[in-house]
Image (cartoon, rainbow, N blue to C red):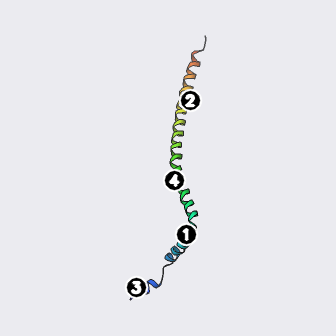
Amino acid sequence: MGKKDASATKLPVDQYRKQIGKQDYKKTKSFLKATRQKAEVKKSSSGLRDALLVVVAILVFVLCVYAFFYLNLSTEINLDLDVD
């Protein structure tokens, strides 16, 4: 008896979800497919981007180490060239 009365009144959240579902059905299949493909491309490209950033970071680190040693060795050589 009480269940019929409870189901007759819908919660605002359920009505909102139903409206959202109706709007989703209004979209064409080609639009939904394009959106899905765009999301897949975005997911796969993020892995490539992360790998590229790691490689660039390693190269920058190696370049900094190389510059440090180059500058230290070049100043030592210049000190030995002083003629008295």
Which residue is label 3 attached to? 3
Q: Which of the two discs, 4 and 2, labels the residue nearer the N terminus?
A: 4
Q: Nearer the viewer, mark 2 or mark 3?
A: 3
* CB within 8 Å, label 1 to label 2: no
Q: Disc 4 versus disc 2: distance between alpha carbons? A: 37 Å
Which residue is label 2 attached to? 67
Structural crowding at the residue carrying mark 2, measured as other residues with C-alpha within 10 Å and reported as few (<14), some (14–19) or many (≥20) = few
Q: Is residue 79 above or below residue 33?
A: above
* CB within 8 Å, label 4 to label 3: no
Residue name at image x 57 percent, y 16 percent: 80
Q: Disc 3 versus disc 1: distance between alpha carbons? A: 30 Å
Q: Nearer the viewer, mark 3 or mark 1?
A: 1
Say which amino acid is labelled 4: Lys
Q: Nearer the viewer, residue 65 or 84?
A: 65
Structural crowding at the residue carrying mark 3, measured as other residues with C-alpha within 10 Å and reported as few (<14), some (14–19) or many (≥20) = few
Q: Position of residue 21 (x, y in %)?
A: 52, 72
* CB within 8 Å, label 2 to label 3: no
Q: Which of the two discs, 1 and 2, labels the residue nearer the N terminus?
A: 1
Q: Nearer the viewer, mark 4 or mark 2?
A: 4
Q: Which mark, by number, is residue 43?
A: 4
Structural crowding at the residue carrying mark 4, measured as other residues with C-alpha within 10 Å and reported as few (<14), some (14–19) or many (≥20) = few
Which residue is label 1 attached to? 24
The quarter of the image holding the N terminus is: bottom left
Lateral position of residue 55 relative to residue 83, left or right: left
Say which amino acid is labelled 2: Ala
Residue name at image x 51 percent, y 42 percent: 54
